[in-house]
Image (cartoon, helix red, strand yellow):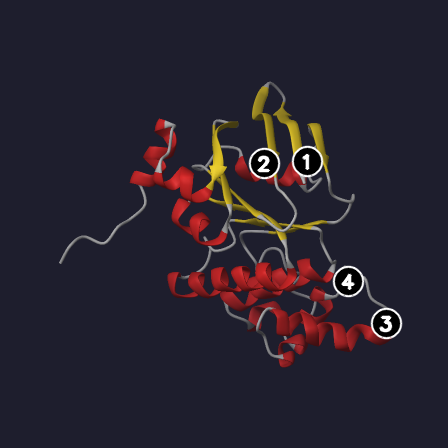
């Protein structure tokens, strides 16, 4: 997927300013920056949810799926998990039972969850459902927008491990949005740093984390919590 000179404006305010990025097939690009940096706006524009200038190429129209930050608000409380997951699935009616079993298994949920409603699941389980629903559409690109920030710390690691497993198993191309460079380093191959709607640094994740060239990137790294010596 190639993002070329993508710009998003709200009236006179420029939220994303001529951003150009490449996400080779099968790789994961981490998009980081503080709140208001434009990363989520960029993601929504790439997914076709916001009007924008510039282009997104190298992906079939309609084959980009997005997983949002709050899994509860992105699931219809009136639909069972099975109905929600298969809402946009590309499958025939007689294949639906097998499809729901396969998708729930992919995200390490029991088939019994299919008959439940979102309110009956934990936050981590709901986020797994949101991921399964996105995968049901057989996306060429999966966008994950702060998918662990609304979860308890004890659950975040499990969801991040799931993303790594899915990447390896399915060969997913991903745009992974986070404010945490440590999380991005764990999941992604490359990283792009945004500030004020602009791209300030971009490169292999280990290179950017170990030898950042922009002062803003260094400030983000300094903000990552570390354990003090005993």
Q: Earlier in the sequence, mark 4 or mark 1?
A: 1
Question: Residue 209 vs residue 55: left or right?
Answer: left
Q: Residue at x 53, y 37 (%)?
A: 39
Q: Residues within 10 Å of mark 3 (few under 14, many from 20)?
A: few
Query: Gap between marks 3 and 1, in whole Å?
Result: 32 Å
Callouts 4 and 2 close, C-beta under 8 Å: no
Query: Gap between marks 4 and 2, in whole Å?
Result: 26 Å
Quadrant where the C terminus sits is: bottom left
Callouts 1 and 2 close, C-beta under 8 Å: yes
Query: Gap between marks 3 and 2, in whole Å?
Result: 36 Å
- Residue 193 seen in the figure: no
Q: Which residue is mark 1?
A: 50
Residue 140, percent across and down? 71, 51
Residue 214, percent across and down? 38, 28
Q: Earlier in the sequence, mark 1 or mark 2?
A: 2
Q: Earlier in the sequence, mark 3 or mark 1?
A: 1
Callouts 4 and 1 close, C-beta under 8 Å: no
Residue 218 versus residue 110: which sits nearer the camera?
218
Q: Secondary structure at mark 1?
A: loop
Q: Which residue is mark 2?
A: 41
Task: Give the numbered dot on residue 93.
Answer: 3
Question: Residue 88 vs residue 75: left or right?
Answer: right
């Amino acid at each position: 997927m190639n993002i070329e000179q993508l710009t998003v404006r709200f009236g006179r305010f420029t939220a994303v300013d001529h951003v150009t990025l490449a996400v080779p097939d099968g790789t994961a690009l981490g998009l980081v920056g503080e709140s208001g940096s434009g990363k989520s706006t960029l993601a929504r524009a790439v997914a076709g949810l916001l009007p924008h200038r510039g282009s997104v190429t190298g992906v079939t129209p309609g084959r980009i799926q997005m997983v949002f930050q709050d899994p509860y608000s992105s699931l219809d409380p009136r639909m069972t998990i099975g109905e929600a997951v298969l809402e946009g699935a590309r499958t025939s009616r007689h294949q639906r039972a097998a499809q729901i079993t396969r998708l729930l298994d992919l995200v390490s949920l029991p088939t019994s969850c299919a008959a439940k409603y979102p309110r009956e699941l934990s936050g981590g389980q709901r986020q797994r459902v949101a991921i399964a629903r996105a995968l049901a559409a057989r996306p060429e690109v999966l966008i994950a927008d702060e998918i662990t920030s609304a979860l308890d710390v004890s659950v975040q690691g499990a969801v991040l491990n799931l993303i790594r497993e899915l990447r390896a198993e399915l060969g997913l191309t991903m745009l992974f949005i986070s404010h945490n460079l440590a999380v991005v380093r764990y999941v992604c191959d490359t990283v792009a740093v945004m500030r004020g709607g602009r791209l300030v640094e971009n490169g292999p994740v280990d290179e950017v984390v170990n030898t950042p060239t922009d002062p803003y990137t260094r400030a983000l790294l300094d903000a990552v919590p570390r354990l003090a010596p005993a």
